[in-house]
Image (cartoon, rainbow, N blue to C red):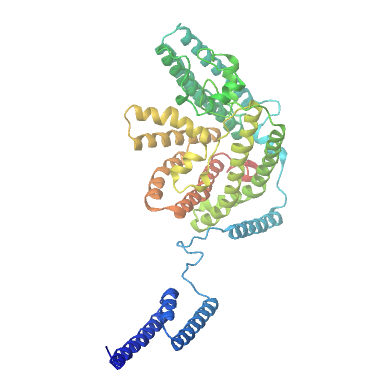
Amino acid sequence: MIDNDDFGPITRNRRRATITSAKNETVKLKNGATAAAAAASNLKSGPKTRESLTKNLQLNEDSKQKCDRYDKMSCHKLQESMLSSASSFTNYRGILNWCVVMLVLSNARLFLENLLRYGILVDPIQVVSLFLKDPYSWPAACLVIVSNVFILVALYTERKLAMGSISEKVGLLIYIFNLTVILCFPMVVVLKLPSITPVGGAFALGVYTILFLKLYSYKDVNRWCRERTRAKARSLSRSLSCPSSPSASSGMQSHVSYPGNLSLRDMFYFVFAPTLCYELNFPRSESIRMGFLLRRLFEMLLLTQLLVGLTQQWMVPIIQSSMKPLQEMDFTRMTERLLRLAVPNHLIWLIFFYWFFHSSMNFIAELLRFGDREFYRDWWNSETITYFWQNWNIPVHKWCLRHFYKPLLRRGAGKLLSQSAVFFASAFFHEYLVSIPLRMFRLWAFMGMMAQLPLAWFVARFLRGNYGNAAVWLSLIIGQPIAVLMYVHDYYVTHYQDNLTITEAL
């Protein structure tokens, strides 16, 4: 038998081991041990150990509460300033409203200053005199009526080509002659007929320029149709036309195939439609919305009066006061006049953009139930010069892309050469529409357009994002007044310096 005293040292060692383990568990709990481990050690420990663990848990809870209170009192965290580019903040509506309010207030001050200095200069009768010198003679309107001859020549040529009465080469020669006369005939009439005013001449030349682009597209599309017909295709592929929904077109009108499109009705629908690109089946809307039509008509009438009033009341006095600094080559005063002219000129340009591309073209499209209403895109967000010219005038951009840029690429020309050719053609028509009505050739508009090429390269190469967008806006705000001052100064010096004042001239 073994004596009980033999177990004495062993028992004491076990107790010591138990107490030591309890202390270790307490240390673990303070260092972040789990509650499950504390509970297990609590079961193996004695009453005193459980009391100590309870106190430790209370202390731990107190420390947690203190940490929570500290977190609530903390007012700092890792974050960026709102105006920093690294910030995700995007709501600047208040700043935009502030800019609008400041713009209204500053222009109101300028308007009051203008009234106090010059009085009321708005004269609707003077606007009529810009179009007509003699109330009984309307040369510009007669010139527009004569343009129907060139439309009928194009239609007659296409019918002969469709029947095979003339060859493709003969048809091409007729078109070359017809399109050349379209550009040269009104130019000669405007230059030789003194009764045509500059504004009336610009209007007539604008009509003939649009007709030139339309008939060129008419020629190309019908030639594509004949090529497809020879390949036994019944109609023009949609890939050659502006994209539209076939179901929408077929649901509201019968599908037209070549040569069924060579009718007088189809021809004049295209002439009046707000597009420069011809196709056999235009997308059509279901009906005419009278509310939409009346809103656009109201905008057209209101904005026309606003444009006339701003031009007479705001721009004319500034231009008049700019003549003397230009003649004396006083660069300081010239710069001051240029900056004064920039604001009204740009405002009038924006109003004209809305009047023409939104109100007028939507009015015509609604009357004709023309379905494609994409006359412009978000050019105001342009970060490059190229993006602006591609999106502010969609009808011209589509024509250039379809009938000029892509054909050059197919003939082996490079992209840079093709883009330069498009800018050159645009510069030619800008100068054509300005110099001929003014009866003087200074090439300011031509050089201004060609200067867009190096400017576009510079902006695309060195400016990005908001800086590029600011450069586009700056070119629009400053570039146009320079051309306006140059042409008005040259026109004044050429025609009115010795006889009339600039106010009478304008």
Q: Foreground: 323 or 388?
A: 388
Above or below for 397 versus 144:
below
Q: Residue 293: which quarter of the image?
A: top right
Q: Position of residue 166 (x, y in %)?
A: 44, 8
Which quadrant is the N terminus positioned in? Answer: bottom left
Q: Position of residue 184 (x, y in %)?
A: 49, 24
Residue 432 appears in the rendering: no
Residue located at (52% from left, 42% from top): 487
Q: Tally the marks.
A: 0
Residue located at (43% from left, 41% from top): 447
Residue located at (45% from left, 62% from top): 86
Q: Position of residue 337 (x, y in %)?
A: 56, 54
Q: Residue 387: which quarter of the image?
A: top left
Residue located at (55% from left, 33% from top): 437
Which quadrant is the C terminus positioned in? Answer: top right
Above or below for 82 versus 267:
below
Residue 260 appears in the rendering: yes
Q: Foreground: 31 or 2?
A: 2
Q: Is residue 129 left or right of residue 198?
A: right
Above or below for 476 versus 219:
below
Q: Position of residue 99 (x, y in %)?
A: 60, 58
Furthest-front residue in view?
Answer: 1
